[in-house]
Image: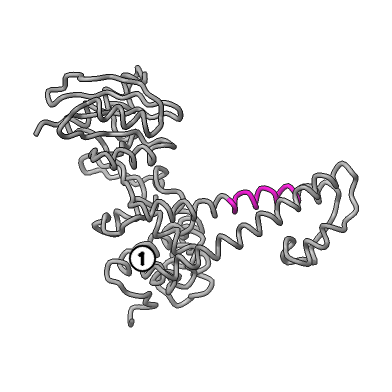
Amino acid sequence: MRTTYVGMDIHKNFIQAAALDEQGNIIMEQKFKTNDKEIQRFVKSLKAQKIQAAIEATCTWYHVYEILRALDVETTLVNMRRTKTIAESKIKTDKLDAKTIAHCLRTGFIATAYIPPKHIMEQRNILRHRMSLRKELVRYKNKIHAILLRNGIQHRGYSDLFGVGGMNFLQHITIPDSEQYSLTSYLNIVEALLKEKTQIEKKIETLCKNNHQAMLLTSIPGISYYSAMIILMEMGEVQRFSNPKKLCSYAGLVPRTIQSGSHVYHGRILKECNQNIKWILGQCTHIHIRHCPSSLITKLYCRVESKRGANKATVAASRKLLTCIWHMLMKDETFKYDNDN
């Protein structure tokens, strides 16, 4: 059965595609709109027995992937940074990128990215929406704090300025009209965001309670329903990591290593990683340290902090926590507090 290799350079409004035969000859080059009918028309026009496609990881990639999968096209997601032929190219055009992707797919020199199952993608979208709400809340709360600072207003009597008492205080302060309009607007936005946050957290709690692996993670002090779901959904299927070191590398919790001959250099931790899982692990680690002083994770943190400082201790403890998570998921076990258990 002959295979046709297709490379797609995907944009918001259009796709540039190139199709090659098994010898690398160009069968077709075409530019078409990013919609269902146009993609289906292009695939059918190839009249191929078997089609393999490689697509760029852009904001619209998943929709294109779903259409291609429905058409029985074997589809690969390209990691553009690690596909050197594309990433290091000095001349970049849409046509050239599409052809290069197709050639790399045909010759097996393409760096692929992980495509999660549909249910993981859907739940990941919910969790990322919750993260975006948090960022917006922080943004507007900071704007309110700035107004108070500009007008010399103290609020030390409130542990939570945006709780019931704090909100009542903010609604009754006296400031110039020019600032009052902005403050009222920001307070309305914060109230709306808090309401949305509460609703989505209820949905996340329900999702977590229906997920056996997520409930295993909540047995770790410091990991909530929300944290457990972020870790699981951002990680994807744990079986794709053959050992905990690979999972820690994915989360950016291992140092860069450069080795030449007998010389080995360990640098800073990796920046090219899943930032969401890295962030949530840092948050969970600090909560765990406060509430679980007897665990090996806390003992490691204290030992490293005394020698190398809090930042390096957080990374080391987060790495230990993620290693525990990998073993728990692979062995289907709850968290164990010390060596005796």
- Judge the density around disc 1: few (<14), some (14-19), many (≥20) Cα neighbours within 10 Å: many
In which image quadrant can residue 12 be found?
top left
Residue at the image point whose x is 33% and y is 19% from the top = 95
Residue at the image point whose x is 32% and y is 34% from the top = 55
Q: Position of residue 276 (x, y in %)?
A: 46, 51
Q: Is residue 273 above or below residue 319?
A: above
Q: Is residue 106 above or below residue 290?
A: above
Viewer-proximal residue among 246 and 320: 246
The quadrant of the picture occupied by the C terminus is bottom left
Viewer-proximal residue among 240 and 2: 2
In the displayed orientation, state which residue is furthest to the left: 1
The quadrant of the picture occupied by the N terminus is top left
**In this figure, which colouring scheme has been used for the structure?**
one colour
Q: Is residue 34 above or below residue 157?
A: above
Q: Position of residue 225 (x, y in %)?
A: 48, 67
Please provide the residue range marked out in magenta. Answer: 133-144
Number of residue marks? 1
Q: Main secondary structure of the magenta part?
A: helix
Q: Position of residue 340 (x, y in %)?
A: 33, 82
Secondary structure at numbered mark 1: helix
Viewer-proximal residue among 36 and 154: 36
Would residue 74 be counted in the magenta stretch?
Answer: no
Q: Position of residue 187 (x, y in %)?
A: 76, 53
> Which residue is under mark 1?
325
Residue at the image point whose x is 90% and y is 53% from the top = 174
Q: In the displayed structure, does residue 71 sit left or right of residue 212?
A: left
Residue at the image point whose x is 44% and y is 67% from the top = 208
**Residue type of the residue flagged with mark 1:** Ile
Would residue 142 be counted in the magenta stretch?
Answer: yes
